Image: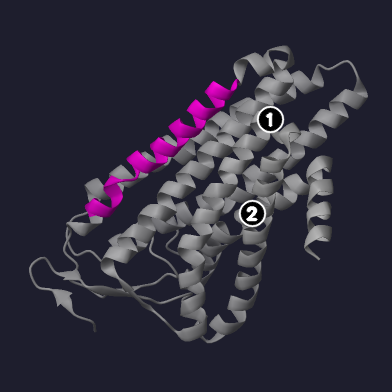
Amino acid sequence: MLAFNRTNLQPTTLLLLGIPGLEAAHMWISIPFCLVYLLSLMGNIALLFIVKTDPKLHEPMYLFLCMLSVADLMLTSSTLPKILSLFWFNDRKIYFEACLIQMYLIHSLSTMESGFILAMAFDRYVAICHPLRHSTILTPTVITGLGLAIFFRGAILLSPHPFLLKWLSYCGSNVISHTYCEFMALIKLVCTETKIRRAYSLLVAFLTGGLDFILIICSYVLILLTVFNLPSKAARHKTLSTCVFHVWVILVFYTPAFFSFLTHRFGRHISPHIHIFIANIYLLIPPMMNPIIYGVKTKRIRERFFKFLIKCF
């Protein structure tokens, strides 16, 4: 057992267990994890480059998508290198302060991702339900303001989390049954009362991801009502096909996120390896899928991407 700080019983270092029950398979699991991480890096960097160099793509939807890509890159880069180090070299040790920083980045960046997906849903709502007012509602100033508001919401609301955990006493094991540092995984190591801290975490989760999801559902209900009232069948089909891709992005992001969140609090009968594996999927799949989904859907992005590949090779 590693040393503890005697003044407040804080561990100087923690040990990441990985995926409980699948430790022997870590090397094999690392192969798809590494491939997905590389695809995520290449896809999001390519998307940012394409949108930046093509003025015709400087529209609200793609500007919000770029903000989402930046958050995706930061999120995966703050977690995957350590996860791969754990899988490849059995590098389980992480300093307590580094663990708190990683936990803050994961939760704050995930909150920002949720906000950017909501902003994209709002853009679709305005474009479909109020097409004539789209350019006057989503002006460059409004887009910048929304982006900053989403950033500061994630940065500020999640800033107390590291301090809520830093000031507690850890008298149990210093082994985290996870591949990365997560609020609920860390708080399970605490030996003092944590009801208030858990309640704060739950409240923040509802005010961010939960509220975002409700607003997204409302926006798509209004979109569907508008679509079904369109006189042209072709117009209905085109609009619905566009919405399907956006709904897919929403499902890919929120499904594993809600599963992990609810399992930590209520899923006592779910196997730990299933929970932890899906928690990793939550970090891996959305950042990889977002540029692929929008790249497949948008002809101009596809064409620019293939031109970029031809120049590179």
- Coordinates of residue 182 in the picture (x, y in percent): 38, 60
Per the image, label 2 sits on a secondary structure element best described as: helix
Residues packed near mark 1 inside 10 Å, few (<14), some (14 to 19) or many (20 plus): some
Instruction: Examine the image and state in which quarter residue 11 appears.
Output: bottom left
Determine the residue positioned at 70% across, 15% down. Answer: 130
Q: Which mark is residue 59?
A: 1
How would you classify the magenta stretch by its main secondary structure?
A: helix
Quadrant where the C terminus is found in the figure: bottom right
Instruction: Examine the image and state in which quarter residue 43 appears.
Output: bottom right
- Residue linked to disc 2: 45
> Mark 1: which amino acid?
Glu
The correct choice, above or below, for 122 with respect to 47 in the image is: above
- Which residue occupies the extreme front position in the image? 311
Determine the residue positioned at 41% across, 51% down. Answer: 107
Per the image, label 1 sits on a secondary structure element best described as: loop
Pointer 2 or 1: first along the chain: 2
Determine the residue positioned at 70% across, 45% down. Answer: 248
Q: Which residues are magenta?
A: 139-164
Badges 2 and 1: C-beta atoms under 8 Å apart?
Answer: no
